[in-house]
Image: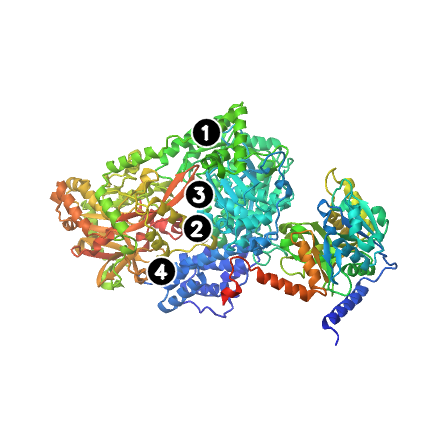
Amino acid sequence: MPNPMLLRRFFKHLHRLLVSAIIHPPKTFNMSIRKAVITAAAPDQKSLPLQSLVDRNGRDTTALQLIIEEAVSAGAEEICIVICPGTEENFVKASGELAGRLTFIEQDSPRGYGDAILRARDFVGDESFLHLVSDHVYISESEKSCARQIVELAKRENCAVSAVQAQRENMLPYFGTVKGLREANSTDLYRISKIIEKPTPTLAEQELVVAGLRASHYLCLSGMHVLTPLVMELLEEHVARAPAGTNIQLSPALSELANRQQYLALEIAGVRYNVGVKYGLLKSQLALALSGKDRDNILSQLLELVALHPISGTTSPEGDK
Amino acid sequence: MTVAPINSQTDVTSNALVGIILSEDDAVRNQALDTVCETCSLEQLQTHVEALESFWRSTENLYQRVRALFFLSAIHRYHLPRYFSANDKGLIPFGPYQHLLERRFVEAINGFLAVEQKQGASAGMSSALSKAYHELAFQTLADQVRKSVRTVKGNQWMFRTGHPADQPLRFRSALLTRTGDTPLFPVLKETTAVRMDFTHSAWSDIFFLGMDFPAGAKVINASVNLGVLDRDASPRPPIECYLRVIDQPILRLASIDLKASAEIDTIAEVFDFGRDYLGLIKAAVIAAGIVPPGMEGCGQTIESLLERLIGPGLGLEIVSKVNDIPKGSRLAVSTNLLGSLISICMRATGQVSALDGALNEVDRRVIAARAILGEWIGGSGGGWQDSGGVWPGIKLIQGARAEAGDPEFGISRGRILPKHTIFTNEQITPQTRQKLQDSLVLVHGGMAQNVGPILEMVTEKFLLRAPVEWEARQEAIAILDEIVAALESGDIKAVGAATHRNFFGPLQKIIPWCTNLFTNELVSRCQEKYRDKFWGFWMLGGMAGGGMGFIFAPEVKPEAQKWLQQVMVETKQQMQSRLPFAMDPVVYEFEINDRGTWGTFDPAHPNRMPDEYYAMMVPGWLKLPSHELPHTARYEMEQLGSAYRDCNNAAEAKSFQKLVEGILPGRKSTRTKTESLDELLKRLGFDHEQHESIQADLKSGRFGLPQNRLPANTSIKDAQEEDFVDTRDAIDTQFSEIGARAIAAGEVAVVTLAAGVGSRWTEGAGVVKGLHPFTQFDAKHRSFLEVHLAKSRKASQGRPITHVFTTGYMTHQPIEEHLNLHQNYGYGGSVILSPGRYVGLRTVPMVRDLRFFWEETTQQVLDEQQQKMRESVRGSLIRWAQTCGEGSDYRDNMPMQCLHPVGHWYEIPNMLRNGTLNRMLTDQPELKYLLLHNVDTLGASVKPDLLGLHIASGKCLSFEVIARRLEDRGGGLARVNGQPRLVEGLAMPFEEDEFNLSYYNSMTTWIDIDQMLGVFGLQREELGDVDKVDEGVRNLGLRMPTYITIKDVKKRWGNGQEDVFPVSQFEKLWSDMSALSEVTTNFFVVPLMRGQQLKEQAQLDGWLRDGSSAFVEGLCQWD
């Protein structure tokens, strides 16, 4: 008996392929995505990627290793990690057996997220590349990893693609947010027209409402993109224009990219967890465990914890009797 | 007459009135209702009513529905009544009336219509239906404004954010970064101008009107900086707001002008607007999304919200200051303050693009939309141009047509938010702007009046397309174009001529009440003194008397503004007993603000809180034990101390002086006040014994609002035909002749009751109602007293009628001075004042009486937000009564406001005790009858036929009653346990009993003097015997019931600020004379126009339109 969920996903995927083939016939060349850029240079990210986790298979690993594996799963052959000066040794240690594929670039005198990506300009050359942030853990709900989903789409559509997730508006302070138009006959594909970094709900409501999403939900970037070399040009222009000392963000460059090239957003079949927020590491770990082979074990331990630590001030189960 | 069933399926669109509503052709659409209806027969009106009734229920379009409702209201109010028989008797049912009070308007209308189907149409029922349609129309409009405000993009999220965890805003990091070694977070400061309306928009900036007729909604509006002449060195933006993060997880709000601050730790308290004077700041905090409106009732702490918004352990402090600009300036100070507060909060949370400096157009529009929201939340109201101070310079603001994509599209013709177009320096040159400043004298005349009724009147008139008013509106729109042209050509004299013409032309045609004697007097003094150098008057908004403008030739302006200051103060002193002044007039210095609202933030040179903030806060800090003093407060005091030591200029020294004054209190003026109250009580013959006895009864529960009522088993039935004489049709001429003879023989005198101040008339402002120049007759403002004398002049049959005005402690001196000054308005007869001999001292109410008054008696429920505000205020008032001591003396106000008149029963005893009646009878022994009436019963006159009827009946008292309309609450003519008498509303065992009574007591009474004296146990010869008179009065007084009532009293403070307190007082009422078995009585049913009373200024417009004013004028003969 075939799994109905898998069947549904298969048909959905097939449908998307067919629609895409009709609406956006492939260009004459294929976008080859061999390189990945992972940013880990923010001062508060120095140690986040180095955190230990247990993966879905019960194997000890690190957040960094998981993100590198995500890139590799999407076909990245060369991976560049942009780091704070003096942290390379730790990152090498945390990369495990994949360390050999890595190139490290130090971001001295840092000027923000966009600047960190721009440091990898020579590394990517004139190729499109996969970009991931180092403090996220992705758990795919499909057979394909999250990164692979966007890379395949980017190759097929021959354009930049960002992974997005619909988020409630109370999460807006954490994300770049996308204004997009849903592609016809698709439930998870959007044509991006604008991106604003961490918008206020007031602005989001005026500028970023996406038809088809539930009320008070917005499409937020998930820290995973396939970017074309134009992004590097745009970032360079931004750096040149910005007054000295100001930070360079990625979102404005992406918003400009949407004006210049076809740029798509894909609601990935998977979930992104941010290790960097309060309890983020714990939540990421639980998500990994609950989606892997130790699920039952962890569930029972969680229940035990819940039973042992009732919320103070509430009635215990015994008290209810 | 009957009305079609509600579900009538007739095709209503063929009806002429429905056609007017539906028409897209302006010529048809703008036709006046009155023009169509004035020639209609009853049947035609009935057809219109049926069609409109069916139409409003079926149409989806807001404006069509609202116009249909206004049409219905006006037909019931002004057109149908002319067909009702004078003798019809329609009882207003209590059930639907309760629906009306509780704002269930549709249910009320259904109920009234159902009863009307059964009992037929009547004046009473039409008055009820008219009121219900009117209220439903306004409610529908208000709901739509609210809906539009909620659905403006950028506002919606706030209504669905219901929990602190959902708060999507974050503070800008710059505000969270301390610099140097200071423990304080940096201060963000916002300065904002106020707005000045150049054209007076003919009130077209009312939201409803902009949404109805966007093309007609246009104003020119300038942002101005202000200073007070001789007080401030130079004009500056009057509004300043300050915001900073603090180290405590609370919301600290402070208003420097109102000297109020609060530390808020629950979200619920933010929504409690009436709790303190910080309602406006709270509304701004809500409208800016810091505490989104969706969180009302979430039961969470402020800490949990601020943790998410700012950070753990941190809080927020917001301070407002309006540079002592008084209330009622007509410069939209409060809306611009709201805009300024919203702007600073939105800067802090990144909702507008700039943390400091100017705002862009998109941001200003968001702020204006939020200010509208804030006004709705705070239960206040302003026009759509009022946040104009947020914009820079001079701009044209105009209504915008709703287009596809707007939330208003398909619902109303216009959008809620207007368009702003700023005039460039090429259009209005800097020289012109300077010339304007060199010519215009801006003042605050000192009057504080409620413009709410005027705004309702205007809305109704415009939506009905009343012909005179509609034409005047077009005229006002044309004047705007003229003013624009004059400004563009730099001709300030022409601007003055146009604003002057606007005020004396279209504006007064639309609302005659927008001017007053004070304003007219000032304008004529200006014209007299400066002749062609006075270029014109400029009405600033709402109504004249508060903020106003006078334009002079530049060469005389400096002198004129000083002269005007003096003249305003003098005129105010002359008129303060007649008109409601809240403060002394002031002259402003002003300049046009070219920046709009402006933020300053510079961590390198941080803003300090204003000096007045420290003067307010430091005394509180000093009271804290050192271990409880927050370290930030300690640091701030150290900073102040250092600044004081380094202080080396006079300005700084002055600010420290304020601080020291705050810390070291001087002698309080309240001591003097208490003494003068006691002196006053002594002088007025206050009866301590009686007061203490009433106070004891009040506290013990023997007296109180519930005890006013007759026993529950009392039978209250409507009067039967044999109980009254209906004089509305015709009275036999023989009575007329009897009356005329008596008048000619000098047998009758008039007694006008003018002892009270008419607290409803000026909403507790303590103005002498009798002297209020409330309307213009024969092109002059006339007071109530003048009208009464003019009627007596006309009624005299060759022999002038003696006219008595009874006065009280508050009204005697002003009335005496006024009548002397105006030589009794040239009245040929004798005018006598009968001063009061009784006075009461108000008491702090019992909480049980307050609760009974608010909860057990039917009261008009207010609009949703206003009702919330009212309930919150009531909570505060209960706390106030408990803190002050229930039933204790009310002394915390101006002495005069602490006293109260003791009811109109005492007026005749006063005439006995003060010797007035004795003197009258000595001087005019032929005198036999008195006509006693209230000061506000303008139709009451010495009518020979009624007098003849009274004489012929041979009875002691003949009371005049009128058919009851909806507004006539407070008892009436009834059979009480089988006996006809007047019964007060206060005494009704059940409120609904009143609704079974057909006739309302007008208080007008014909008195047979000798019989009345007999009731007091006196004869006319004994009136000189003081002891006997006193004994007679005392004995009868003991038999009269004592009622406890709750009255609203205003307490004025600060700069035109007013608080209203409910206080208890006692009364004995004249109508209870009809209950005495030895008093023989008649009850005359008289026409409405004769018996109706003008209790509130809001009635004036209807009084003018329904012909009552003309009726009164017909009774008068002017000097």
Residue B660 - label: 1
Nearer the observer: mark 3 or 1; the answer is: 1
CA gap between label 2 and label 1 equals: 35 Å
In-image side of B871 versus B151 (left or right): left
CA gap between label 4 and label 2 equals: 35 Å
- Disc 4 residue type (three-letter): Gly
Residue B514 - label: 3
- Disc 3 residue type (three-letter): Cys
Tell me the quarter of the image containing the C terminus of chain B.
top left
Circle 2 chain:
B
Say few, some or many: other residues with alpha carbon within 10 Å of mark 3 (under 14 / 14 to 19 / 20 or more): many
In-image side of B704 versus A274 (left or right): left
Say few, some or many: other residues with alpha carbon within 10 Å of mark 4 (under 14 / 14 to 19 / 20 or more): many
Nearer the observer: mark 4 or 2; the answer is: 2
Say few, some or many: other residues with alpha carbon within 10 Å of mark 2 (under 14 / 14 to 19 / 20 or more): some
Are circles 2 and 3 on residues that touch, CB within 8 Å? no
Work out whether residue B827 or residue A7 is closer to the camera in this orientation and state it. A7
Work out whether residue B36 or residue B823 is closer to the camera in this orientation and state it. B823
Q: Are marks 2 and 1 on the same chain?
A: yes
Q: Quadrant of residue B766?
A: top left
Q: Secondary structure at mark 2?
A: helix
Are circles 4 and 1 on residues that touch, CB within 8 Å? no
Mark 2 / mark 1, whichever is N-terminal: 1
The residue at which mark 4 appears reads as B124
- Place of residue B1112 in the rendered image (x, y in percent of width and height, measured from the top left): 33, 48
CA gap between label 3 and label 1 equals: 45 Å
Mark 4 / mark 1, whichever is N-terminal: 4
- Disc 1 residue type (three-letter): Val
Q: Secondary structure at mark 3?
A: helix
The residue at which mark 2 appears reads as B872
